[in-house]
Amino acid sequence: MELFFAYIDPGSGSLIIQALIAGMVAVPIFFRHQISRFLRALRGGEKKAPGTLAPTDDSSRDA
Amino acid sequence: MTAAETPDPPAPLAARAPGPVPTPVEHPGPTRDPGSYRDPAGFVYRRSGIIYRQIQASFADDWEHFTRAGLYDQLRDEGLILPHEEVDADLAAEPPAFCVIRPEALEFISYPYEWSFSQLKDAALLTLRAQTLAAESGMTLRDASAYNVQFQRGRPVLIDSLSFERAEDGRPWVAYRQFCEHFLAPLALMSRVDVRLGGLLRDHLEGVPLDLAARMLPGRTRFSLSLGPHIHLHARAQRQHADDGRAATGQAAGRSTATMSASRLATLIESLGSTIEGLDWAPVGTVWADYAEHTSYDDAATAAKEAAVAAALALAGGSRAWDLGANTGRYSRLAAERGYRVVALDVDPGAVERHYRRLRDEGRTDVLPLLADLGNPSPAQGWGSAERASLLSRADADVSLALALVHHLAIGANVPLSMIAALFARIAPSAIVEFVPKEDAMVQRLLASRRDIFPDYTIEGFRAAFRQEFEMVGEVPIEGTLRTLFHVRRRA
């Protein structure tokens, strides 16, 4: 795979370990999603889909 | 980091005045931003006092995708990116250019080592939000430098519009390392060890090395499901693969084998987001955070001081103010309410943090709190000492406020009054300065534990010192106190 525009050094270790780290952190994130899905079902309300990073305080303030 | 983007020191001053896009009648030599050299996709330069960015033909496809496929519009509409307009390609600094853009002029340039904890945290969340939106548009952030973020109208924005490239399925996030070094490591250290470790960013312009962060963080963070992988395991992987390039021919072995699905990448970003969200710091126990609430004078005296400052500001005129020793911003607000755009400097991370949070909560856009030690302001740094401008070279104020400050410099830090006057004269042509005499309780407190070696620290000494640099415009005793408010104007 060529990294045409990776003008910064992404670091071999940083590239290689990412998939493993993403796998590790997938476990708590999976449970968090399950819990929020459960809570949503409990409330019966509609909420933002899990898994999307919420906008920062700032981005939502004067939108 | 393209954001090396940071316009060079005098640029923000000159570029501030909004105006029509100039017609290329004449082409006075463009000057390339001294910090804009890393990225071959384009660079920032200044022409006739206006900041432009040239985009090279090699980056044309990604740029087209960024601007035409809706990502730029979305980032702009959410207020996440500094808006730009495309201008005549004839304005290119080094033709041929694929195109030239003129970004909105920045109000002020500040650097991550001048931000409070929450300012850096908000900049980190902004970066992740941009990556999330980019992924939804089939693009990715190709860098995650903290220097790609500036505060504009009180809010962090991305200033590097060349940071987005089309995503390729299976490719890991090339900016992961940079994100961790520029944002995660310093925030983790500030939150879990000591907020003053934010100062490491001043020493490490490329971000805090992860092995350093790993050594300084409490041992238990190794077992956390957030800092454990993103800092400790990450640092270890960096160490293990440090020599990969030596064995590989052509491309480093690791780069050609590392793959990662889009959903894995989304998980990684989400995890970074919740990790950053989980880092917090409450400003308790720092020296100044409670100072404004525990001043020595009563409400009537405070009202008298406010009235005197307001009257002096009305006389001073101009549109930009620097509040030196701003604490949590009582007088910054007073100036902002009178139409000034204020840069509010304080040496205490707790005061700057509180000030920023308060402004953020209120949605105020005209005050920028920054961490600065007048005894050691940010130096010029980076390549050729030109990449990151010194704080004093960025001084753009029409008037400076120095309220309840001079005694801390003169008696707390042994700076002679004449040197204080000289520094104020460098910062702004006008100054509103409060003199606090030795009889005042606050000065007594400073003198309590040391010998009084300050025979010249008197109101006469103050007048004499400031007359070397300034003309006296006004001198008003603050009712109900022993203090005096001076309004001075720099000698022509």
Image (tube, helix red, strand yellow):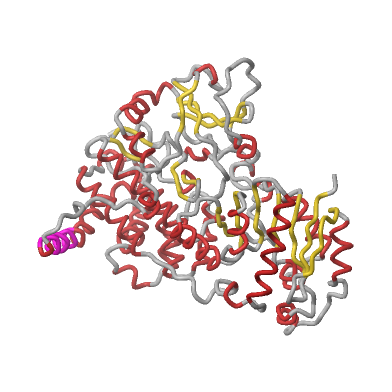
Residue B295 picture location, percent across and down: 63, 76
Q: Is residue B275 magenta?
A: no
Name the residue at 74% across, 58% down: B432
Name the residue at 37% across, 45% down: B175
Which quadrant of the rendered structure holds the C terminus of chain B?
Answer: top right
Q: Is residue A38 magenta?
A: yes
Residue B174 vertical placement versus B230 (above, below): above
Q: Nearer the viewer, residue B144 or B91?
A: B91
Name the residue at 49% across, 26% down: B54
| Occupied quadrant, residue B433 | bottom right
Residue B50 vertical placement versus B79 (above, below): above
Q: Residue furthest bottom?
A: B448
Name the residue at 72% across, 51% down: B427
How many discs appear?
A: 0
Residue B331 vertical placement versus B380 (above, below): below
| Occupied quadrant, residue B302 | bottom right
| Occupied quadrant, residue B139 | top left
Residue B125 picture location, percent across and down: 37, 52
Q: Main secondary structure of the magenta part?
A: helix
Residue B145 picture location, percent across and down: 44, 46
Residue A50 picture location, percent across and down: 20, 54
Q: Which residues are magenta?
A: A30-41
